[in-house]
Image (cartoon, coloured by chain):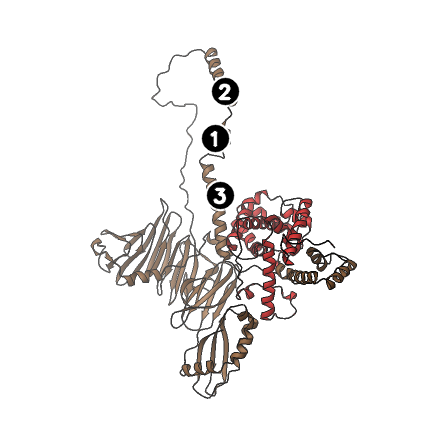
């Protein structure tokens, strides 16, 4: 073969689409032609990546958010279609929209005129009838009895969205609180824990420790919650005709759409409103508690509108922290029981946690999540949130994640940290990271290490890094080979930049 | 007979024809649980298809959303002459094509953090990759994507489906809503341009002789 080989022919050869004889001829040519040999090598290298390109898996995405957006988009479109069809305005054809061709308009006018003329000519002219004012009785027909039945309002049910500690449902301490729905008549009682129950999009309550709440009436028309203790509520704006009451002893709190807290105990009733407006009433009077206001009604006193006072910044913060947990996408409780799952985050001590960036309060706790991968972060002793890992959740299957708490700092940390940094074999470390250094990149490892009095390393863990796992292992080996002298025992975390 | 492309759609999406028909019917009846099921079964496949065709994850969330919105909207028109996964793949191809047309350039930088995120079928690598080898592989992949980007959108899609996904002309014709002859012509020119770039020749460079 004397002529150059086209680049795509090399690709055909590597894909096995050419005969052996032709491939041999092409190789023979490449032996004597540096240009073709170079092209062959380049195409071989690139073609060898095709299987890995084909095998590349999708990166993790915010699946729940995407799902919510898809459903929102599809359902809004559907709602808009339904609205149009309810108004009786179907999709208009160009003709009905005023774009009828002139010949059609002319024909219609002629036809209409003809029909009117024919009617005038054929029908006898009747004298004008006096206007009828009296109803005309129809004697031949018996009156049809009509019984009016009031429509039954759709019942509401609640779903536990977050639980910390123990809770009793209808007097029984249940383990399956995430797998059941809470209908009207349910009584929820907390011990030292807190439970959040969602009952609609952006509507939920959070029952504080040592409190009891009864879902006295729970339907689309009227919600009545009777509370002993403290309950924080967030309520989406009510539709016309819907009423929402919290009954606290002799006082009744009515809301339209707001976030507020009601506490009722032996000292009386306190109502604090974070935003929106609530109306507190009893036999004596009514008081409006607006945004960032509170009202305290003593045990033996009655509602007095003049006692409404502003909330302090600290009180507002408390209300904000007690916001009930809600699912990002609420459909209906029965479906959500099947399509969501409880995620338990277990910690040794109490530790603030975030799931997917949303702060949920102090773990251990259980929270309702949608299926998918969820990132869990926990706060360290300084209150900084650090990533603890992720957990895959499947619909209707409880998931659990045990979070390793940060080791308590011990004495001698500074000395051991100095020893560590002084004794790292930087030449070996550079070998581990040569590839990324050549690429002009830098990285880090975040380690946790424990050293005893004899200088032996009890454990060494890489708790965070952006290195590839093989490089991280190499770095770990270098760090594990550091020799410590006798000295104070120390357990600490450190970040080593590479 | 339900047509299907050779691409492995993953075990999560595996669904018998009867179950698939049932799922589609329930989705058409606005059954929210069925729509969720469809989404959960095919979300990774859809994201993977888009990710591989486009070569990066910029706005991947939006594109996955677009695919599913189009799918739910068009489910009434789905005739069942292909598998649901193939039909979704077709939507992915169209969405990706639209994306390629509107996008100027993909970001060139590849971070080391990407090494782990780009998971590879373990059967393809006999031993764990060294960082150098992994970086080399990413650079080679990057070169392939750069070469793909020099092609016109339609050529790029058919070349990707043929050379990388390994689909035949008939399958590609279904996915790009064209006929096999057109696809063959498009592929012929696409391959010439693509491999010329990969080989390091410029498009206006010396043509050389044929073998």
The residue carrying pointer 2 sits among few (fewer than 14), some (14 to 19) or many (20 or more) residues within 10 Å by Cα, namely few
Nearer mark to the viewer, of 3 and 2 = 2
Q: How far from the left and from the top, in percent, is residue A46?
A: 64, 61
Q: Which mark is residue B113?
A: none
Tell whether label 2 touches label 3 (CB within 8 Å).
no
Q: How far from the left and from the top, in percent, is residue A371?
A: 51, 59
C-alpha span from label 3 to label 1 = 23 Å
The letter of the brown chain is: A
Q: Which residue is mark 2?
A: A106
The letter of the red chain is: B
Q: Are marks 3 and 2 on the same chain?
A: yes
Of the pair A351 and B141, the residue shown nearer to us: B141
Label 1 is found on which chain of the structure? Answer: A
The residue carrying pointer 1 sits among few (fewer than 14), some (14 to 19) or many (20 or more) residues within 10 Å by Cα, namely few
Q: Which residue is mark 1?
A: A97
Q: Total label count? A: 3
Task: Give the answer, above or below, for where B99 lies relative to B122.
Answer: above
The residue located at (60%, 60%) in the rendering is: B143
Helix, strand or loop status at disc 3: helix
Q: Are marks 2 and 1 on the same chain?
A: yes
Label 3 is found on which chain of the structure? Answer: A
The residue located at (41%, 29%) in the rendering is: A143
Q: Is residue B30 left or right of residue B125?
A: left
Q: Is residue A370 left or right of residue A246?
A: right
Nearer mark to the viewer, of 3 and 1 = 1
Q: Are marks 3 and 1 on the same chain?
A: yes
Of the pair A12 and A492, the residue shown nearer to us: A12
């Amino acid at each position: 073969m004397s002529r150059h080989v086209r680049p795509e022919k090399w690709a055909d050869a590597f894909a096995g689409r050419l005969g052996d004889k032709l491939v041999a001829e092409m190789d023979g040519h490449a032996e004597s032609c540096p240009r073709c040999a170079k092209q062959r090598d380049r195409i071989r290298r690139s073609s060898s990546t095709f299987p890995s390109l084909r095998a590349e898996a999708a990166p993790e995405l915010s699946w729940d958010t995407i799902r919510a957006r898809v459903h929102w988009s599809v359902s809004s479109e559907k709602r808009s279609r339904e609205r149009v069809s309810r108004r009786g305005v179907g999709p208009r054809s160009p003709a009905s929209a005023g774009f009828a061709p002139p010949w059609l308009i002319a024909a219609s006018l002629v036809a209409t005129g003809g029909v009117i003329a024919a009617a005038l000519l054929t029908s006898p002219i009747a004298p004008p009838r006096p206007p009828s004012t009296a109803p005309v009785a129809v004697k031949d027909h018996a009156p049809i009895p009509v019984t009016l039945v009031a429509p039954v309002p759709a019942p509401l049910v609640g779903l536990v969205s977050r639980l910390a500690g123990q809770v009793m449902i209808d007097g029984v301490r249940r383990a399956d609180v995430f797998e059941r729905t809470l209908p009207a008549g349910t009584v929820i009682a907390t011990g030292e824990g807190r439970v959040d129950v969602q009952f609609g999009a952006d509507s939920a309550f959070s029952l504080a420790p040592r409190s009891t709440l009864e879902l006295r009436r729970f339907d689309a028309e009227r919600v009545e919650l009777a509370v002993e203790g403290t309950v924080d509520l967030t309520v989406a704006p009510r539709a016309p005709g819907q009423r929402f009451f919290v009954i606290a002893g002799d006082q009744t709190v009515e809301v339209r759409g707001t976030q507020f807290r009601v506490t009722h105990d032996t000292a009386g009733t306190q109502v604090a409103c974070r935003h929106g407006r609530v109306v507190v009433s009893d036999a004596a009077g009514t008081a409006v508690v607006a945004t960032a206001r509170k009202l305290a009604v003593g045990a033996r006193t009655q509602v007095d509108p003049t006692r409404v006072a502003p909330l302090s910044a600290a009180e507002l913060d408390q209300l904000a922290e007690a916001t009930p947990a809600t699912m990002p996408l609420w459909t209906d409780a029965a479906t959500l029981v099947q399509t969501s799952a409880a995620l338990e985050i277990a910690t040794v001590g109490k530790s603030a946690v975030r799931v997917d960036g949303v702060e949920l309060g102090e773990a251990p706790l259980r929270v309702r999540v949608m299926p998918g991968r969820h990132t869990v972060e926990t706060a360290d002793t300084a209150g900084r949130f650090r990533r603890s890992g992720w957990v895959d959740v499947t619909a209707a299957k409880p998931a659990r994640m045990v979070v390793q708490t940060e080791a308590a700092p011990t004495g001698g940390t500074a000395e051991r940290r100095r020893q560590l940094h002084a004794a790292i074999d930087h030449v070996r470390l550079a070998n581990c990271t040569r590839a990324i250094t050549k690429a002009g990149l830098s990285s880090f490892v975040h380690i946790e290490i424990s050293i005893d009095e004899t200088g032996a390393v009890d454990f060494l863990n890489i708790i965070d890094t952006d290195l590839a796992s093989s490089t991280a292992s190499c770095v770990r080996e270098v760090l594990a080979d550091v020799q410590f002298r006798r000295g104070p025992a120390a357990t600490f975390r450190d970040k080593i930049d590479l | 007979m339900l047509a299907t492309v050779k691409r492995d759609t993953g075990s999560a999406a595996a669904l018998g024809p009867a179950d698939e028909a049932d799922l589609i019917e329930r989705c058409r009846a606005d059954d929210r649980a069925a729509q969720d099921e469809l989404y959960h079964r095919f979300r990774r496949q859809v994201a993977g298809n888009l990710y591989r065709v486009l070569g990066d994850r910029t706005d991947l969330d939006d594109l996955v959303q677009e695919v599913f919105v189009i799918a739910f909207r068009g489910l009434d028109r789905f005739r069942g002459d292909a598998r649901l996964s193939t039909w979704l793949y077709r939507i992915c191809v169209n969405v990706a094509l639209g994306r390629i047309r509107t996008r100027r350039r993909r970001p060139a930088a590849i971070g080391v953090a990407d090494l782990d995120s780009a998971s590879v079928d373990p059967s393809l690598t006999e031993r764990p990759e060294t960082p150098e080898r992994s970086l080399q592989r990413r650079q080679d992949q990057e070169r392939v994507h750069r070469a793909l980007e020099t092609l016109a959108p339609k050529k790029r899609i058919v070349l990707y489906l043929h050379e990388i996904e390994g689909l035949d002309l008939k399958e590609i014709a279904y996915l790009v809503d064209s006929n096999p002859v057109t696809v063959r012509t498009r592929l012929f020119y696409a391959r010439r341009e693509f491999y010329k770039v990969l080989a390091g020749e410029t498009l206006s460079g010396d043509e050389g002789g044929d073998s």
